[in-house]
Amino acid sequence: MASVPGTAAPVSPQATVFPILVSLGFCHMLNDLMQSLIPALYPMLKTQLHLDFAQIGLITLAFQLTASLLQPTIGIYTDRKPQPYSLAIGMGSTLIGLILLSVAEDYAMVLFAAAMVGTGSAVFHPEASRVARLASGGRYGVAQALFQVGGNLGSAAGPLLAAFIVLPRGQGAIAWVSIAALLAMAVLTRVGMWYSARLRPAHAVARAVASPAALPNSRVIFFVFILMLLVFSKNVYSSSLTSFFTFYLIERFHLPVQDAQVQLFIFMAAIAAGTLAGGALSDRIGRRPMIWISILGALPFTLALPYADLFWTAVLTIIIGLLMASAFPAILVYAHELMPGRVGLVSGVFFGFAFGLGGIGAAAMGRIADAHGITFVYHLCSYLPAIGLVAWFLPNLERKRA
């Protein structure tokens, strides 16, 4: 239940329901594991289908743009008519996408399969975020962090799964990963039963709490724009790492593919740890300070990365992952508090915007890499965290409530 700027934060009528949060985090892990498998397969697909970097970027665009366009629409609809079992149904789209990807023999089929995986994520994220907030017991930062860290763990495990299982056995081994989608559908069905049983009283409380925000609509729109700029700086930079980091390591340090995938796993694991820490810290120190620390604090390390040797590249990517990932739980909860009672819309917009930025960023960076080389991409992207300076315009909502 959202708190309203300028009023006392409502006391939650229930304790934090950790089994539901853990279940959502687990399914988020499986969802993002399957999603992150696609970028991890890029070296194999590039060789088999004779793709250039621009075409590689378009694959990322296919599944992330699908999620980006659909998530806000789904969020608006489920704000009005929550759908407890849509979580399991959406996971079925991911299942279909993986099966198609395992048998795809041309570039068009790969794009369509990637779009199906993106559709599954579009259905999953807005409603799962709403259930996490319902189960939070008022600990919104912790709830969002537990939910999101599952996705980060899945993203970290995807490259390892590709490096040690799929790549040695070939494209057909992707079909075995679809078992994860079936497992997620079973767990999400149970979560849907819990959600359905609490849906009517939760909706009634949300209506009672969700009065108009004290801030004027024009200022709310401006602050949401600032938050989106912050997401832009974070996600475009992260996309440059997740989509092309293995190619960067292979080109600059002459690493074999498996060693490069391990380095990518280390970066993704740092993102998972940063998300969990950021959610807990934002409940303690406030959303605005956490945003300042995470995005702007990463700037010195991103500027140093293009000049580092292999050892310091690994160290710097860990620090960058920890810092930048800690921002998103704080940004999302801050947006929930700006627009109380619109959890689905806010979650859909921000998750969708993040996905879309990742896809657009990957496509743009692919073209730049084709024209100027992978190393130039990392020189260019190193300045993106400087956009974190716009966090100065955000008001301290916790101080307003106090």
Image (cartoon, grey):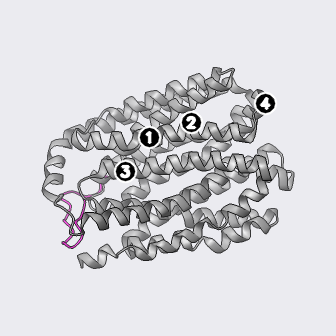
Q: Give the labeled residue for mark 4.
A: 50
Q: Is 148 situated left or right of 363 in this image?
A: left
Q: Earlier in the sequence, mark 4 or mark 1?
A: 4
Q: Earlier in the sequence, mark 2 or mark 1?
A: 2
Viewer-closest of 113 and 138 = 113
The numbered disc on residue 69 is: 1
Q: Residue at x 57, y 45 (%)?
A: 359
Determine whether label 2 and label 4 are within 8 Å by CB: no
Q: Residue at x 78, y 30 (%)?
A: 50
10 Å crowding of disc 2: few (<14), some (14-19), many (20+): many
Q: Position of residue 86 (x, y in %)?
A: 33, 33
Q: Position of residue 33 (x, y in %)?
A: 56, 41
Q: Secondary structure at mark 4?
A: loop
The numbered disc on residue 347 is: 3
Q: What predominant SS class does the magenta segment belong to?
A: loop
Q: Give the residues in magenta.
A: 1-17
State which quadrant residue 200 falls in. Answer: top left
Viewer-closest of 152 and 237 = 237
**Residue 322, above or below 201:** below
Q: Position of residue 109 (x, y in %)?
A: 61, 23
Q: CA gap, disc 4 to disc 1?
A: 29 Å
Q: Position of residue 158 (x, y in %)?
A: 62, 42
Q: CA gap, disc 3 to disc 4?
A: 37 Å
Viewer-closest of 48 and 219 = 219
**Residue 333, above or below 82:** below
Residue 260 visible to an observer of this rendering = no
The numbered disc on residue 62 is: 2
